[in-house]
Image: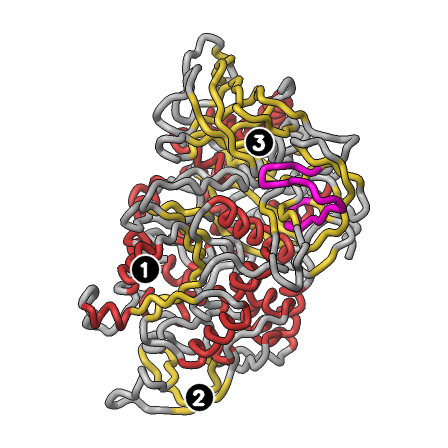
Amino acid sequence: MTTPDYRLSQLETLEAESIHVIREVVAELERPVLLFSGGKDSIVMLELARKAFAPARIPFPVMHVDTGLNFPEVLEFRDKRVAELGVQLVVASVPDAIARGTVKEEPNGSRNRIQTPVLLDAVEEHGFTALFGGARRDEDKARAKERVFSFRDEFGQWDPKNQRPEIWDLYNGRIHLGESIRVFPLSNWTELDIWQYIAREQIAIPSLYLAQERAVVERQGMLYAVNEFITPREGEQVRREWVRYRTVGDANLTAAVASRATDVEEVIAEIAVTRMTERGATRGDDKVSDAAMEDRKKEGYF
Amino acid sequence: MNPVDVHSAAAAQAHDIAVARKDILRIATAGSVDDGKSTLIGRLLYDSKAVFEDQYEAVERASKGDFVDLALLTDGLRAEREQGITIDVAYRYFATPRRTFILADTPGHVQYTRNMVTGASTADLAIVLVDARKGMLEQSRRHAFLASLLRVPHIVVAVNKMDLVDWSEATFEAIRDEFSAFAAKLDVPDLTVVPISALHGDNVVRRSEHTPWYQGPSLLHHLENVHVASDRNLVDARFPVQYVIRPQSDAHHDYRGYAGTVASGVLRPGDEVQVLPSGLTTTVAGIEGPRGPVEEAFAPMSVTVRLADDLDVSRGDLICRPTNAPHVTQDLDALVCWMTDEPLRPRQRLAIKHTTRTVRAMVKDLHYRLDVNTLHRDLEAGELGLNDIGRVKLRTTQPLFVDEYVRNRVTGRFIIIDEATNATVGAGMLVPGS
């Protein structure tokens, strides 16, 4: 393949940048781990990690912070992908932590906040010094401010007003014992870039991301597919609708969106004309306040 | 909410525009809220349809005046919203059918200079905002100077709030001429000046009817069309080795690949190459990209290079052509932007990260400190404080493989790390003489 004008396309540029970041972490930090949820962003990140070290294996384990509120299909997908790549899977389990008494279930049933201490405990237990996360800057105002190499103190906290300057692509991964770096190789990707890359590289994804006719209930204007965690409440009508998941989070909180996009190309067309952000459309947990994400990130959320 | 009709002509068109091959233009904006910087960015995002309905509704709810305050789209941290200022860089993304854009929205205040340097360091183009009523202020000079120091190849001066000076051509021309004279001293290769009103959208996306005397493009039209292909160095092949890939598996028993990002120039299989610091020569046996073998590798491709001979090559080494090698030196002469409270002083020991090589260094001499507002050189300065810029001589414990920053933005740059705190405390650009 030759490129006559020596210009990379936007996808090739983003891919090269992400691979550079992933390799730099492995070269400079002792015990990296990649946070893998089975969601589309972490699937793309894992694929980029595979490319970064081919034909060798990915030289670090992957970790899933398991809230116990998973879509079964996503768990299956996780296990299949991990087996194909021959990487080690570390599971940090929120239900186990609840059983041990290290965290307490919140009254609203959301495990979004309590997964943070579970994550931090697992990081300490395994001595991980760098955590790859699939977050993108276009997702949220607080994320838009985050560095690619984001320094965390020994409590896993982010200090947004005092971040390390990050100049050119010369990343500083130096830390003291107990500190860590969150690394976001997909920082500059948008939702549309992720989907274009999935299409271009023919990357397998859980079929939840594609439209199917499902039994749904409507809550606060959002559509929730009935599953083991979402059962119709009194007065709620179950109806059948064509829906897909635009994000895959906890099964008790992630709403589906009305959609007719049954393959990846149709998803691209849909996103290209859709006028609502991913998180606004599908996450009950981000509606708390304008600074909800900033507050959670400061505590050590990824 | 009704689902999008993914089979409609509109959806098909949106799909085709989305997947069409585009390049990325990286932009940095500098200015304060008072200059209308956040409003301009909000306007670019909104008019290029990068603002989603829920974001717009949130801004509409939060707006206090008669119009929707697009500035509220940008500032992300609680402290920024409370104080009405930009503290740290925020990254924004938008696309048109021609290009995709990564916009680093950087603070304008002098106390956040280091954050502006962070945002501008990767930019192809910098937008400097000037308030038409106030003309060129100290701050505008500083922004233009920092962009030129970092060798951002294209600078656009957006003369904003033209509606408040009755679209006066004379006002615009005075600012344009003053800026051009200043830019001439800075060696800015490409300067464009556009009269705009970010609040009303004039000359931002479309040409305005209020400025019949202005013959140039709208700001967005310029961003879409500015020619950046020739900004890169395609002459000097430089490949810093980032990581050595050795699968040690049965299928790839003897495989040894040198992974890295091409800094400049072009590498091809069959090329005769030299490895630094050993100086040994060999040929390129093959190059693998993310989708398998490639015929050539150029910046900023991330590839894996295999060499014909079994040499001792490790991270921090550099592959180049035997006839075109960088300087191998332990003495650095650089313009340094200092980024921490604890000042830089002669005799100080620091760590330097240059490409993939990290070495220890000592400050030998502070030649001068530059006043970023007047460009005056203070030869008597004994130290560099936070946000100061000065010319510094350093001696490293190991040789580095360097080019001048004006010739090579990758091999001509380095960061400085404090070994006690691990903080990034400075950025350096090598000047001729290294």
Q: What residue type is labelled 3?
A: Arg
Q: What chain does badge 1 belong to?
A: A
Which residue lies at the image location 60% right of the left edge and 28% below the top edge? B400
Give the number of callouts. Answer: 3
Which residue lies under the disc numbered 1?
A122
Residue A113 position, x and y percent, is 27, 63
Q: Which amino acid does label 1 sit on?
A: Ala
Which residue lies at the image location 55% right of the left edge and 50% below the top edge? A23
Which residue lies under the disc numbered 3?
B413
Examine the image and state in which quarter residue A123 appears.
bottom left
Q: What chain does badge 2 belong to?
A: A
Which residue lies under the disc numbered 2?
A214
Residue B107 magenta: no
Residue B103 position, x and y percent, is 53, 47
Q: Which amino acid does label 2 sit on?
A: Arg
Residue A277 position, x and y percent, is 45, 65
In the image shown, does A20 or A189 lie closer to the viewer? A20
Which residue lies at the image location 35% right of the left edge and 33% below the top edge? B421
Which quadrant of the rendered structure holds the N terminus of chain A? bottom right
Crowding near the residue tagged with mark 2, few <14, some 14–19, many ≥20 C-alpha atoms within 10 Å: some
Compared to residue A149, the image places residue A12 above or below, namely below
Crowding near the residue tagged with mark 3, few <14, some 14–19, many ≥20 C-alpha atoms within 10 Å: many
Along the horizontal axis of the image, is A68 left or right of A278? left
Along the horizontal axis of the image, is B176 left or right of B130? right
For label 1, the SS is helix
Examine the image and state in which quarter residue B381 appears.
top left
Which quadrant of the rendered structure holds the C terminus of chain A? bottom left
- Mark 1 or 2: in front is 1
- Judged from this view, the residue extending furthest toward the right is B270
